[in-house]
Image: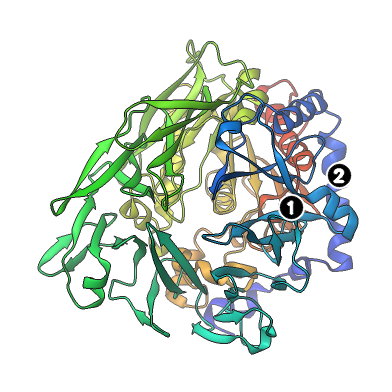
Amino acid sequence: MSKAHDESDVDRYLWLEEVFGDRALGWVREQNAECLAELQGLPGFETTRARLLDILDSEAKIPFVEKKGRWFYNFWRDARQVRGVWRRTTLEEYRKEQPAWDAVLNLDALAAAEGENWVWQGAGVLEPSHDRALIFLSRGGTDASVMREFDLERKEFVPGGFALAEAKNWAEWRDRDTLYVGTDFGPGSMTASGYPRIGKEWARGTPLQDARTAFSGRHSDVGVQIRVERHGGHVHELAWRGVSFFTNETSLRQGNTFVRIDKPDDADVETCGPWILFTPRTDWTIAGRRWKAGSLLAADLQAWMNGDRALTPVFEPGPKTSLTSVSSTRQCLLLNTLDNVRSRPFCAQPAKGRWTLTPIPTPAFAVADVHGIDPEESDDFFLQVADPLTPSRLSLGTVGSRATELLKSLPAFFRSDGLEVRQFEAVSCDGTLVPYFLVGPRSLSADGSNPTLLNGYGGFQVPMLPTYAAMLGAAWLERGGVYALANIRGGGEFGPGWHNAARTHSRQRAYDDFIAVAEDLIRRNITSPRRLGITGRSNGGLLMGVMLTQRPELFRAVACGNPLLDMRRYHRLLAGASWMDEYGDPDDPADWETIRTYSPYQNAAASPRYPRVLFTTSTRDDRVHPGHARKMHARLRELGQPSLSYENIEGGHGSASNNRQVAFLEALMYTFLWRELSGEGGDAGR
C-alpha cells in the first residue's frame, strides 16, 4: 500500500463500487425511491417533464445530416421512434420543409426483434462506394458497443460480414475487404484505461484471431487507434498511440509499416490532402522559430516525412483568441475560433506559400460551427449558428461566396421576450480575469433575489459556450430564473494555456475561478447565497463536489451529474486511469498532496451545513464509475448532510438512453433547483 493510501483511511463504502452487485443495486433502488417520493410529486414536475419531452420529441427539430456519396444521413428520435431511426435523403429533398426520408435502420424494430435495448453509437461508411457501413450499437447507452457490417443498398446486416463482440471497439475501413480494428482480443490486449492496446488489420473471410497486428501500444497508455483520412484523392493511414490523455505518438503508414511522425508529444496531427497539420499544446521551437501553443501549422506531408522542417502558420492565437476545431472542403480549411469566448469562423486557403484567412460572418454573441460537407468532391460547407435566445439555424455555403442558403431553423421552444445575454468578468484570487455569460431579464432587479443557476466545467480544454438550450429555457429561464455560464481555467476558451493553468498541481485555480464568478454574481446583487444554485456534469460534477465541500456558504443547492468525487480511487475505476494527465496520480505522494486538498469524498465533513445536493448518475456509465456518486451520497447521509440521489439503470455517461429518460432526469433536476432557489417551497427541503 502506498503512502497515499494508508490504513487510517479505510473506505467503508467500497461495496457501492460493485456496479451490478445485489446489495449495491438494492441500495440504489432505495435511494431512488426516496428521491422520487420527494421530487416527483412537487408542483410543476409533471408539467416540466411533459414540456421537455415535447421539445425532445418535436418533429420541428433540425435533422442534422452527414453527406456520404449522394445521400445525406441523419439519426432521428421522436415519440414514435423512441430508440431512433437511421435515415437518409437527398439535398434536393433536404431543402424542403418536410423532406422525404428513406429509412435505413430502425432501432426500435431491431431492439424488439433481438430483445435488446440497443442505443445508437454511430456508423462508418465505406469510401468511395458508400454501399456498406460499420454500425456500432450499445446496450443501454454504454461506451462499450457491438459492431456489425451493414449493406446500405439492401438495408440489412451482411450475413457473415465483419462483426465485433461487445467491447470498447473501434473499426475503420481500409478497403472493401479489409478493416483496421481495435477490440478486446483477449488477456493483455486492453490498456489500464479499458481501451484497445492493439490495432489489427483484418481481412474479410478470415477469423478475427488471425488478424495481423498493425500497431500496438503499452498497457499504461490510454489506447491505440488507426484512422484512414481521405481528402481530394489523397489517402493517408495514421496510427495513434495515446501515451496519456494529452500526449501521443502518431505514425504514418508507408508501404507495409507505420513510420513515426516527428513532432512534439503534446501536438495533435492530422492530414489534409498533400498537407500535414500540427496543433501543439505547448510552445514549439523548430528550425529556429518558436510557435505558440494552440497554433495551427501546415507542412508538405511528404517533404516533412523526408526531413524538411518548413512550417507555415495557418492560425496563430492571441491573448484572447483560440482555435477550437478544424475541418476541410476540397480546396480549403474551415476554422472554428473564439475571440473572448465569441465564435469567429474562418476559411483558410493556401496561396503563394502562405495561408489567407477570410472571416465567415456571424452575429456577435452567436455560437457558430462551420464544417465541410464533402472534402472529396466540393467546397460546400454547413454553418450552424445559435445564441442563448436565438434558436439554431443551419445554412449551406460555398467557399468564395459570402451568401449562404438557409436550410433549416429551429422554432423558439421558450419565450425569450424581455431576456438578454450579457458578458461579465470576475477577478479570481490571483488577479486573473475570468469571463462569464449571464442570461436573464433585461430589467433584472439588483436586490439579490433572483433564482440563479451557475454552470461550469473547467477541464480537458473543453470550452463552455453560450448556445441555445431549449430545455434550460423552458424549465428555468421562462419561469423567471437567471442563468450564468462560467468560463473558468481548465477549459479551452482561451486555448491550451487556459487549460494548462488548471491542470494537476494547479487544479485549485479552476475552483478559485468558479468561486470568483459566484462571488461576482453576489457582489453585483444579481443573486445571493440563498438564491444561488450550481450545476455541472462529469468533470463539472467534480467541480460541484469541490464547491460543496470548500465553499458551502456560497450556495443553496447543487445539481451534480455523473461526477468524479473520490479522487483517491478515480484512477482505479473504469476509464479513470486515462485522466491522470489532467488530475495527477493519487499513488504518487507529490500528486496526492495536491489532490487530497480538494477531493470531495475525502473532505466531506459534518459541519458546516452543506447546501442541498442532488446526485444523478447511471448504472451503465462505463466511463465515470457510478460509485463516485453512490459513495458520496452515502457519506453525506452518514454525516447528516442534506443529499438526494437518483441513478438511472441505463444511459451510459449521458445518463439516459432515450428522450423519455432525458426529460425525466432534467425535470427532476430543474424541479429540485426551483424548489430550493425560488423560495416557493420554503425550507421544506432543508
- Up the image or down, 485 lies above or below 153; here it is above
Q: As drawn, is 50 to the left or to the right of 447? A: right
Tell me whether circle 1 and circle 2 mark residues in contact (CB < 8 Å).
no
* Label 2: few (<14), some (14–19) or many (≥20) C-alpha neighbours in 10 Å: some
The circle drawn on residue 34 is 2
Whether residue 284 is visible here, answered yes or no, is yes
- Up the image or down, 431 lies above or below 276; here it is above
State the image quarter where residue 487 is shown. Answer: top left
The residue lying toward the viewer, choosing from 440 and 639, is: 440
Residue at the location (70% across, 85% down)? 207
Cα separation between marks 1 and 2: 21 Å
Q: Image quadrant for the C terminus? A: top right
Which mark's residue is nearer the viewer, 1 or 2? 1
State the image quarter where residue 92 is shown. Answer: top right
Q: As drawn, is 624 to the left or to the right of 314? A: right
The circle drawn on residue 651 is 1
Q: Please tell me whether mark 1 sits on a helix, a strand or a loop.
A: loop
The circle drawn on residue 275 is none
* Label 1: few (<14), some (14–19) or many (≥20) C-alpha neighbours in 10 Å: many
Residue 440: horizontal and vertical position, in percent? 52, 20
Q: Please tell me whether mark 2 sits on a helix, a strand or a loop.
A: helix
Tell me the amino acid under the disc marked 1: Gly
Residue 430: horizontal and vertical position, in percent? 31, 47
The residue lying toward the viewer, choosing from 351 and 647, is: 351
Residue 626: horizontal and vertical position, in percent? 71, 60
Whether residue 609 is visible here, answered yes or no, is no
**Lower position in the chain sequence, tag 1 or tag 2:** 2
Tell me the amino acid under the disc marked 2: Glu
State the image quarter where residue 473 is shown. Answer: top right
